[in-house]
Image (cartoon, rainbow, N blue to C red):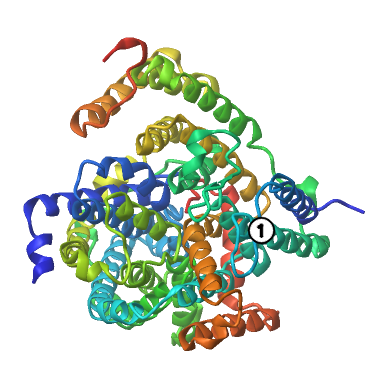
Amino acid sequence: MLGFSVALRPDVLWFAFLGCVVGTLVGMLPGIGPLAGISILLPLTFGLDATKAIVMLAGIYYGSQYGGSTTSILLRIPGEAASVMTCIDGNAMARKGRAGAALCIAAVGSFIAGTFGVIVLTLVAPPLAAFALRFGPPEYTALLVLGLIFLAYMSTTSLVRTLLMAALGLLLGTIGIDVMTGHFRYSFGIAELGDGIGIVPVAVGLFGLGELLATPSRQVKNDVTAPKLRELLPTRQEWRDSAWPIARGSVLGFLIGIIPGSAHIISSFVSYALERKLSRQPEEFGKGAVAGVAGPESANNAASTGAFVPMLALGLPTGPVIAVLMAALLIHGVPPGPNLVNDHPNVFWGFVASMYVGNLMLLLLNLPLVGVFVNLLRIPYAYLYPLIIMFCVIGVYEVNHSIVDVWIMLIFGVVGYGLKKFGFDPAPLVLGLVIAPILEMSLRQSLIMSDGTWSIFLERPIALVLLLISAALLALAAFSMVTRDWRGKLAEVEAGEGADPGPRL
Amino acid sequence: MTLRTDHAAGLFFIALGVLVFALSGDLPFGTISSPGAGMMPKLMAGLMIAFAVAIFAVGHTSQRLAEIDWSDRWHALLVVLITAAGIYAYQRLGFLVTMSLLVFTLLVIVERRNALIAAAYAIGLTLFAYWLFGKALKAPLERGILWF
C-alpha cells in the first residue's frame, strides 16, 4: 500500500507518464535505443527526488519495449533489438491487412507480461534482499564472476569476444584514484579522470553516437502507413491463438530476465522458437502467425521487469540499461542493494507500484495514439540525428559539467563504430565498467580477509556454490560447439542489422 | 596469409594490453594478502591479451579484412569532425551559438540540405532545446559569448 500511496501521487504519476511517452518514442525512433535514451535524459532528473527520477527512467526503459514493436510491425524495422522477432510475423500480419490486430496483441501481451513480471518482482525481491544481507566480499566477488560468465554464456556473439569486452570494461573501470591506496591510475594528469570514466559518456558514445555514425541517412526509409483505430481489434480466433503464447512468454521472459546478459533480446528469440515448436501449424510462422507476435512481445517485456530483481535485491546490474539506472539511483544518493527496501522503502515500493501504473498507462497510450506516434516516423532521419547529437552533447555535459566527459563520449562513439564493424558487442564493456569498482573492492577485501589465501572462495558455501555454477557454465560453453537454433538466428539477424535502416540497442 | 577481421582485432587488443602493462610501471601489484593498485588493471590486461590471442588464433574462419563495408566512412568522419568542432566551441561560444552551428553544419555539409531551411531548423531546434533544458528544467547551460 505504501508503494501505491507514492505511485498514485499526481507528481509521481506525471513523471511515470512522461517516462512512458518518451520511452515509446525512444523505442520507435531510429538511431536511439533505451540505453542511449536513458543516458541522455539522466541529467533531466537531477532536479527531481530519487523516486520520481527512477520512476521516469524506468518508464523510458519499459516504454521503449512497447514502442519498439510498432516499427517492427508497420515497417519491418526493429525499433529496438528485442523486437527483431516481432518483425517476422508482425510485419507479415501487417501485409495481410492485420496491422492493427498485431499492434493490439503486442500491446496487450506486453501489458499482461509486464504486470505479471511486476507481481513476481513484488513477491521475490524483498526475500532475496533479506538473503543477500548474508553476503560478504567473497560472496559478492563470486556473484559478480558468475554474472560475467552468465553474460558471456548467454551472449549472442562468441564467449571469448564477450569476455574480452568485459575485461576491457573492467580495465577501463580501474581508471582514476584507487580508493584503497590513493594511487592515480592512468589519469595522465587530467584532473577529471581522477574520478574515473563515467558510465554515461561511455554508454552514450557506444550506443548513441556510435550507432548514428554507422547509419547514413540515405539508408533510412520513411514510408509509413498508420492503421486506423477501428482496425485495431483482433478477431476472436486471434485472441485464442495468442492467449497461451502470452502466458508462456510472460513466465519464460521473467526467468530469463533475472539472468545477466541481453535478457530482453534473448527471451524474445527463445519464446519465438518455443512457440514455433509447440504450434500445430509451424509452417504458418514467418507468414503472419499471431503466436509469433504474442510470445516474443510478452517475453521481452517480462524480461525487462525481471532484470530489476537483481538490481533492487542485490545491487547488481544484469545489463547496461540496468547499470545506468543503478547509476541514476546512486547519483540521487540511494544505493541499490539488499538494504534498499529497509533504508528507502518509499523509493523501493513507489518504484514497484509505479510499474503497475506504468504498464496500464502504456496500454492506454499506445493503442489509441499509435497513429500519432507513427507520424513521428515521417520526420526525415537527416533532420532527426542532428537533434540526437545535440541531446547527446547536452546530456553528457550536464552530468558533471565536464567537457572532458563530452570528449570521452566522442571517443567512445568512434570506438562503438569500430566495434560494430569488427563484430564486437559493446554491452559487456559497459557492464564491466560498472561492476569494476565493486568487483575490485570485494576481491581485494576478500584477499585481505583471508590473509592472502584464495581458498576463502572455496571455504564459504555461498561463494563456493556460485563459483561452481560459473565453472559448470564455462565447461558447458566449452563443450557446446553445437549452436542452438535461436542463437544462430539471433547472430544472423544482428549481422544483417548493419544494413538495416534503424539498428539500435 | 590473408589478413582477416579477427586477426586485426586480435592484434589490436594484444597491443592495447601490452600498452597497459607499459603504462602500469609505477603501479604496485602488491602481494596476495595486500593487493596493490596495480593488481586489478594488470590482471585485466593479462586476461584481455589472453582472449585476444584466442581470437587471433581462430581468426582464419572470420571475414576477410577487405570485405568490411566502409561505405559509411565519409558520413562517420564528417559527423565526428563536426561534433568535435562543436565540443571544442561549446564552452567558448556557449549553448545557443554552438548548437545552432552544429545542427546547421550537419544539415548543410553532411546532408546537403538547403541552407535557408537548415538555418531555420537549426535555430528553431536550438531555441526549443534552450527553453526545455535551460528554462523548463532549469539545467545550467553554457552561456559563452552571449551571456544568456
Q: Is residue A118 above or below residue A40?
A: below
Q: Is residue A501 above or below residue A431?
A: above
* In the foreground, A236 or A45: A45
Q: Name the image quarter holding the N terminus of chain A.
A: bottom left
Residue A401 in picture, x, y percent from top left: 37, 32
Q: Is residue A50 above or below residue A479?
A: above
Q: Please indicate, yes or no, whether residue B125 appears anywhere in the rendered image.
A: yes
* In the foreground, A37 or A47: A47
Q: How many marks?
A: 1
SS at badge 1: loop
Quarter location, residue B41:
bottom right
Residue at 24% across, 61% down = A232
Residue B51 in picture, x, y percent from top left: 72, 63
The local crowd at label 1, few if under 14, some if 14 to 19, many if 20 or more residues have their Cα within 10 Å, is some
Residue A298 in picture, x, y percent from top left: 34, 72
Residue A304 in picture, x, y percent from top left: 36, 66
Q: What is the chain identity of the residue bearing mark 1?
A: B
Q: Please indicate, yes or no, whether residue A208 appears anywhere in the rendered image.
A: no
* In the foreground, B63 or A202: A202
Residue that carries the numbered disc 1 in the rendered image = B29
Circle 1: residue type: Phe
Asked if residue B94 lies left or right of residue A426, the reply is left
Residue at 19% across, 32% down = B136
Quarter location, residue A320:
bottom left
